[in-house]
Image (tube, rainbow, N blue to C red):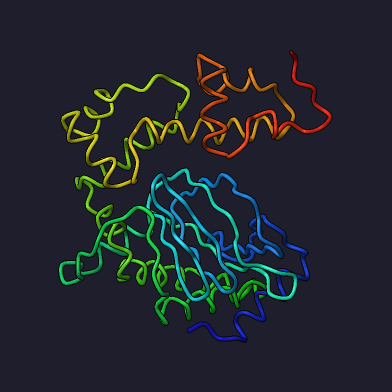
Amino acid sequence: MIDDDFIARVAAFAEARDIRDEPVQCGAGGLAVWRSVAPTPIRPAHYQPVLCLVLQGAKHVSLPGRETKLSKGRSLIVSIDLPTISRVVEASREKPYLTLSLPIDMGLLHDVAGEMDLAGVEAGKADALSAAEADEALVDAMDRLFGLAEKPAAATMLAPLILREIHFWMLMADHGAMLRELCHADSRAARIARSIGIIRRDFTARLRIEDLARAAAMSSSAFHDHFKTVTGTTPLQFQKQLRLMEAKRLIASGEISVSAAAYRVGYESPTQFSREYARTWGAPPRADLPSRVAEPA
């Protein structure tokens, strides 16, 4: 259960800074506040390892073939880099959608895990994106970390301890199974995470499954199966989502035409690009062009 006073303090912080639909840092370790005063359309959301705590309202986060609803009192743990789509579904001026997010420090996580006995923690299902009712101890630690936002002297001394505590509670959480897997350097999850880093470094390049499988020390078939188990999608679909997210950003910025965006992100056929873009975002790429930009005939 999240205390009403905690919610009120975060809401006041966000309103005073007129935070709207963008994360704004508010504390140590990259702690950030997100506030939406109305439901939003579907948007690309590239999650890096992060903990999100929903204080108010609700949001849908989707992977291919799977949708997760985040509502008040639930926490989301994203253990690896994931391209997703999301939309706020419950928010109003009187009762905004409100979350706190904290990047997961993988170095700190490994350090904490090295001092724990994880053998006795129930294995659980290792999902890269997993939500559950937030544990009271985790909520309390997030509350105390946020409370240091305007106390820099205290934050210098206390924030490192609270951040360490939060990473401990994430490792202990029922939906922290993937984090526990990643703390074993040679686990399948850790090897898949490394392959994701390879894809992200150059997502415009032609994807060679055999090269990724070799880097993960797996056969091509085993790599494909484990990649889908960890991410919920195939390597090709993962790369496609990264490409389409970047294309949407480029087109919406007005920096580039639709056809140029297609080539920039690695497509060889603008026709195929437009078809896959519309299937993913629900409208053709021209719909995202700023009104001042004229797409050449």
Q: Residue at x 43, y 53 (%)?
A: 49
Which quadrant holds the C terminus? top right
**In the visual, does 13 lie left or right of 125?**
right
Q: Residue at x 66, y 64 (%)?
A: 35
Q: Residue at x 40, y 64 (%)?
A: 131
Residue 209 in which image quadrant: top left
Percent coordinates x, y for residue 214 in the rendering: 21, 27
**In the visual, does 162 lie left or right of 227?**
right
Q: Nearer the viewer, residue 219 or 58?
A: 58
Percent coordinates x, y for residue 237 in the rendering: 39, 34
Percent coordinates x, y for residue 291 in the rendering: 81, 32
Percent coordinates x, y for residue 186 in the rendering: 19, 45
Q: Nearer the viewer, residue 5 or 106?
A: 5
**In the visual, does 137 lie left or right of 89?**
left
Up-down relation of residue 72 to residue 249 (above or below): below
Q: Nearer the viewer, residue 123 or 263?
A: 263
